[in-house]
Amino acid sequence: MKAAVIVFPGSNCDRDAKDVLAATGCHPVMAWHRDSVLPNVDLVVLPGGFSYGDYLRSGAMAAHSPIMREVKAHAGRGGLVLGICNGFQVLTECGLLPGVLMRNRDLKFLCREICVSVENTQTAFTRNYKSGQVINIPIAHHDGNYQADEATLDALEQNDQVVFRYYYESEKCLPANPNGSARNIAGICNRQKNVLGLMPHPERHAEAMLGGADGAALFTSLLAA
């Protein structure tokens, strides 16, 4: 598995993503947002953070960075693309995923652990999870309220594109839906299942010494891709 982590001005989880991938035996290259050529890789990661300071809309300016032309071409060839938090916002802004990430329901920045259920294990990102498995991973966002029109939401459900959903399991996980996302959606993929975006941060819970390891399976799943 060869991977690249895209670095935008304002990224703050790029090294986290790099370190987690390195722990799986993959040593990704770091690609700058102004690069016009993408290295020959299997996986591209768009990390969390505040690209361009969230100017205009979160992810809106990053979606027009020179490197994103190559990322979109990579996805079009069937290459894997993972967008975490701000990366998810970038994926919706550039059209690789449908819908939009809006301000959280209560207009507050949220930073806490939450529970999500794994809705689809038939992707390169989730094959090491069990269907319906509930995992505990952190969120840290101000614009994580996923919304789309009803037709789009119905299509996501029908095509098994809802990959992660906010879930209530215990008082530790309250509230079940922290940001108001439609149908409790926490992460989706495209129809081809090679592009995944999610608001929670699996890279922050990939080692027990960091507080939890429920996110590790997402990265180990990719080794078999």
Image (cartoon, helix red, strand yellow):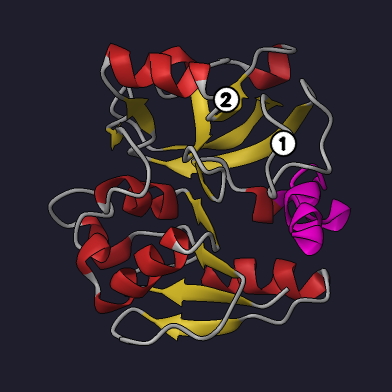
- Amino acid of disc 1: Gln
Magenta range: 205-225
- Find residue 98 and report its horizontal and vertical position in percent: 33, 36
Q: Main secondary structure of the magenta part?
A: helix
Task: Name the residue rendered at 26%, 18% in the picture.
Answer: 149
Residue behind mark 1: 122
Above or below, comparing residue 10 to residue 155 in the picture: below
- Find residue 81 and report its horizontal and vertical position in percent: 52, 59
Residue behind mark 2: 160
Above or below, comparing residue 135 to residue 61 in the picture: above
Above or below, comparing residue 66 to residue 73 in the picture: below
Q: What element does badge 1 sit on?
A: loop
Pick the front one: 23 or 110: 23
Q: Earlier in the sequence, mark 1 or mark 2?
A: 1
- Find residue 12 and report its horizontal and vertical position in percent: 46, 67
Label 1 and label 2: CA atoms lie apart by 9 Å
For residue 216: magenta? yes
Task: Name the residue rendered at 56%, 43% in the picture.
Answer: 193
Pick the front one: 43 or 215: 43
- Amino acid of disc 2: Asp
For residue 156: magenta? no
Q: Are marks 1 and 2 in contact (CB under 8 Å)?
A: yes
Residue 86, visible in the rendered structure: yes
Q: Quadrant of the C terminus?
A: bottom right
Task: Name the residue rendered at 58%, 23% in the picture.
Answer: 165
Q: What element does badge 2 sit on?
A: loop
Q: Quadrant of the N terminus?
A: bottom right
- Find residue 48 and report its horizontal and vertical position in percent: 47, 57
Pick the front one: 25 or 204: 25
